[in-house]
Image (cartoon, grey):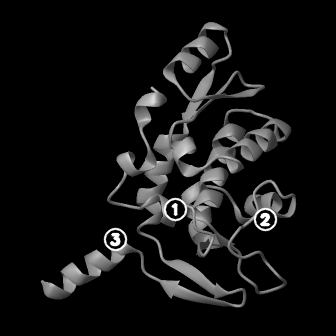
Amino acid sequence: MASDQGSFDEIAPEVFAVHSVDTTDVGYRVPAVLEIVGVTYRQLDYWARSELVTPSVKAATGSGSQRLYSFRDILALKIVKRLLDAGISLRNIRVAIEFLAERGTTDLARTTLISDGTTVYEATSDDEVIDLLRGGQGVFAIAVGHTVADLAGTVATLPAETVVDDTQPVEVVDELAHRRATRRQSA
């Protein structure tokens, strides 16, 4: 299960390379994040203000400023939403999100989060998943690697912005969008 997920490059090599997923130079605006994660602006704003998940590309700096969330921020937000929907407390979710923030993308691709409804456990191999289930810890699980792959496919279709300096976001087109545009022009 978890160990069979492979690296991110093996899961979705055509969508993103690992180095582009981990960048904090490319970000997505709040409306796109709300749609992907499935939360309200009020929830997203609260999570940013309470520092549960803060935008790592560009934080809000006052009225009218735009937050820009990285791929990893959106991944964390999706996991927060799934854990909240499962009834996990915000305190335990904070611990899980801190854990995820310390991991590289390849580590995340091998990780499964398992919860008994109270505590969140990490499993990085089939044996660990089985041990947790045998011990009665499992109520639900999140295969982070599959969430990464699904999210990569979704994010590839969205307009992204890159921050050249802290004040000037510039719109960019990802490689997949560039290929599609080129194909349309030649047709």
Q: Which residue is drawn at 67% across and 10% down?
A: 136
Q: In the rendered structure, which disc, 1 or 3, sits on the residue that comes first in sequence?
A: 1
Front residue of 41 and 114? 114
Residue type, numbered disc 1: Val
Q: Which residue is drawn at 42% across and 35% down?
A: 5
Against 158, residue 62 (above or below) is below
Where is residue 98 shown, x and y percent of the image? 76, 46
Indicate the quadrant where residue 79 lies: top right
State left or right for residue 165 relative to residue 143: right
Against 25, residue 18 (above or below) is above
Q: Residue at x 62, y 63 (%)?
A: 34
Residue type, numbered disc 2: Asp
- Which residue extends farthest bottom? 168
Estimate the spatial distance between the alpha carbons at disc 1 and disc 2, rounded to whole Å: 23 Å
Q: In the rendered structure, which disc, 1 or 2, sits on the residue that comes first in sequence?
A: 1
Front residue of 8 and 93? 8
Tell me whether circle 1 and circle 2 mark residues in contact (CB < 8 Å): no
Q: In the rendered structure, which disc, 2 or 3, sits on the residue that comes first in sequence?
A: 2
Q: Is mark 2 on a helix, strand or loop?
A: helix
Where is residue 22 shown, x and y percent of the image? 57, 61
Q: Is mark 1 on a helix, strand or loop?
A: helix
Where is residue 77 shown, x and y percent of the image? 66, 53
Residue 45, label in figure: 2
- Which residue extends farthest top? 134
Residue type, numbered disc 3: Leu
- Which residue extends farthest left? 187
State left or right for residue 3 relative to residue 184: right
Residue 176, label in figure: 3
Residue 21, label in figure: 1
Estimate the spatial distance between the alpha carbons at disc 1 and disc 3, rounded to whole Å: 14 Å
